[in-house]
Image: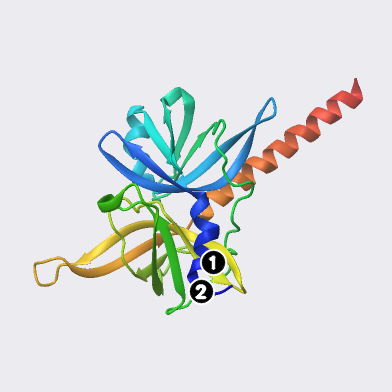
């Protein structure tokens, strides 16, 4: 893969803008879920703080994707926020949207990126919130005691929260996490360049793995009951 541009071409079609009544953030396609009757729901990963207010108070939200938008009332979507982690999901029926037919692979649970490893992310910064923009930086350090969180040396602008952070490994794009926060340096009293936080999306992966296992067990039990009959 030649430079970031080829990787960005693969990632940007997975990225959406999430608009709330008083703010907006970014998100990305993380999974599809079978909703029955030959329907598939799209599952969008984002930072929990982007959707926490809407999830708590039942606010409507808008999902923007490549010039299209959906207004999702509470009964038209499912929002779920992970406790004690800045990770959440929105599940909804994408209708006629031409979303990618596949999701991007996620970095292995045991892989730890070392300081200096390059990372990229794509999202909708509030200063040009109609544009899906690319940013890049490097791993400053893995966060001790976490399961795949990283501090990164790179720009994190309001509106980019929830963006997919990705790396190129062995010539392939892999999701590393999502952009969660930016910590400015206020040592001199003014906001100086600081450091960003990329949060692991392993909790979302674990959620779907558990759901798939339960679905398989229920299917097996259902088949067993049918045989007995």
The residue most toward the bottom is: 116
Residue at the image point whose x is 80% and y is 35% from the top = 220
Label 1, residues with CA under 10 Å away: few <14, some 14-19, many ≥20: few
Q: Are marks 1 and 2 in contact (CB under 8 Å)?
A: yes
Q: Which mark is residue 6?
A: 1
Res 82 quadrant in image: top left
Q: Is residue 57 left or right of residue 149?
A: left
Along the line of sight, which residue is nearer the eye, 200 or 44?
44
The residue most toward the front is: 67
Q: Is residue 222 left or right of residue 49?
A: right
Q: Which residue is mark 2?
A: 3
Locate the N terminus by quadrant. Answer: bottom right
Look at the numbered disc 2 and give the secondary structure of its residue.
helix
Along the line of sight, which residue is nearer the eye, 37 or 181?
37
Q: Picture coordinates of residue 221 (x, y %)?
A: 79, 31
Against 192, residue 38 (above or below) is above
Residue at the image point whose x is 56% and y is 43% from the top = 99
Look at the numbered disc 1 and give the secondary structure of its residue.
helix
Against 27, residue 75 (above or below) is above
Residue at the image point whose x is 43% and y is 40% from the top = 67
Q: Picture coordinates of residue 31 (x, y %)?
A: 58, 45
Label 2, residues with CA under 10 Å away: few <14, some 14-19, many ≥20: few
């Amino acid at each position: 893969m030649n430079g970031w541009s080829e990787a960005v071409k693969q990632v940007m079609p997975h990225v959406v803008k999430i608009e709330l009544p008083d703010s907006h953030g970014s998100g990305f396609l993380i999974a599809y879920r079978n909703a029955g009757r030959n329907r598939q729901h799209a599952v969008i990963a984002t930072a929990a703080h982007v959707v926490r207010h809407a999830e708590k108070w039942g606010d409507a939200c808008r999902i923007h994707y490549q010039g299209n938008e959906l207004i999702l009332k509470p009964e038209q979507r499912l929002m779920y926020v992970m406790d004690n982690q800045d990770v959440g999901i929105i599940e909804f029926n994408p209708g006629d949207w031409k979303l990618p037919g596949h999701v991007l692979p996620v970095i292995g649970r045991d892989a730890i990126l070392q300081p200096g490893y390059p990372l990229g992310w794509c999202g909708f910064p509030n200063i040009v919130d109609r544009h899906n923009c690319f940013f890049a930086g490097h791993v400053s350090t893995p966060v001790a005691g976490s399961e795949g969180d990283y501090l990164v040396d790179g720009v994190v602008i309001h509106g980019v929260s929830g963006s997919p952070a990705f790396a190129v490994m062995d010539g392939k794009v892999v999701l590393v996490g999502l952009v969660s926060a930016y910590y400015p340096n206020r040592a001199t009293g003014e906001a100086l360049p600081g450091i960003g936080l990329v949060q692991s999306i392993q909790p979302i992966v674990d959620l779907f793995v558990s759901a798939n296992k339960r679905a398989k067990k229920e299917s097996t039990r259902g088949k067993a009951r049918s045989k007995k009959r």
